[in-house]
Image: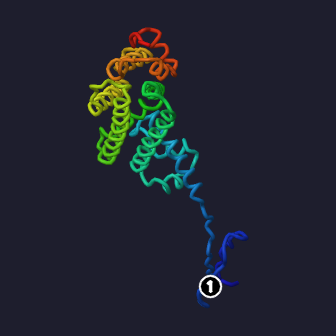
Amino acid sequence: MSQERFTRLPPRGAGRILGPRSQNERSLFFFEVRVPKVSAEHEQRRRQQILDAALACFSRRGYHATSMEDIVREAGLSVGALYTYFPSKEELFLALADTHAEHTLRRLERVMAGEWGLAERLERALDFFFDTLDDEIGPWSRVVLEFLSHGAGGNAVAELERRRCEERRAWLQELLESGVASGECRADLDARATADLLLALSDGLVMHWVGGRLAAPRDELKRAFRILIWHGVLAEARGPSRRSARSKHPAVEATLAAGTLGELQP
């Protein structure tokens, strides 16, 4: 009986038999396997699937308590698929941090898009902040703080947070400067300093949320924040056109009705 060894042939269409390399290797066959091409769109969807799963796991359990196996189960993928896109949990987190910051900025831009007056745009920004504090901004900030506290990849995340803060400051400063120029903000307003203060106030609220130190309900915090802006940032309303610009949002109407903006002079 022949001592030649045989190999299993690939399924039809899966590859091409190259045959033996020499007469002394008659029993060895080599196959050229055709690997299916994956489109860039498919890769992007798969990558986003992993990032969404990682965000859910990190928000639920924290960074250090989450394993790559947890993310695999959450995403419904194989271990190999996960490591193909992200070789380590740290690299996955850094990619998630970058994507999350970009996603949040794009959402805020959509919220603020439109021909709104300054008061309406600030009100929309307040809505976005307080509406996402419990479900998005707060939980994500907790994960970032945990990640930074252990030093792993801290420089990369710290740099990302610094750039994110600069983008927010530049956007807010430009908004306030346009308000001063249009007369919607106080004439003596320092746009750069005010942008810093508003960012510090919002970031401080987030840190107190993370630490469980917020005593007032969300609606009271939001109303107090609004009054600070209305009295400390916006100019006193004059004329029907200014009233119209301020009253497009239901919350602005309520504030006007309550008299917290002062009397509007025709």
Q: In the figure, 127 relative to 154: above or below?
A: above
From the top left corner, tell me how far across and down residue 38 is, in percent.
60, 61
* Image color mode: rainbow
- Check disc 1 and give the amino acid type: Pro
Residue at far right of view = 12
| Residue 39 drawn above or below residue 111 | below
The picture quadrant where one finds residue 4 is bottom right
Looking at the rendered structure, the secondary structure element under dot 1 is loop
User: Which residue corresponds to mark 1?
Assistant: 20
Question: Mark 1: few, some, or many residues within 10 Å (few <14, many ≥20)?
Answer: few
At 52% from the left and 55% from the top, the residue drawn is 80
In the figure, residue 144 lies in which quadrant? top left
Q: Position of residue 95 (x, y in %)?
A: 43, 48
Residue at the farthest bottom position: 23
Residue drawn where x is 32% and y is 48% of the image:
156
Foreground of the two, 97 or 245: 245
Q: Position of residue 35 (x, y in %)?
A: 61, 67
Q: Quadrant of residue 141?
A: top left
Frontmost residue, 19 versus 198: 198
Residue at horizontal 40%, vertical 19%?
226
Q: Quarter holding the C terminus?
A: top left
Is the N terminus in the top left, top right, bottom left or bottom right quadrant?
A: bottom right
Q: Is residue 58 left or right of residue 149?
A: right
Left/right of residue 227 with respect to residue 7 in the rendered view: left
Q: Is residue 173 above or below residue 91?
A: above
Q: Who is closer to the viewer here, 123 or 117? A: 117
- How many numbered discs? 1
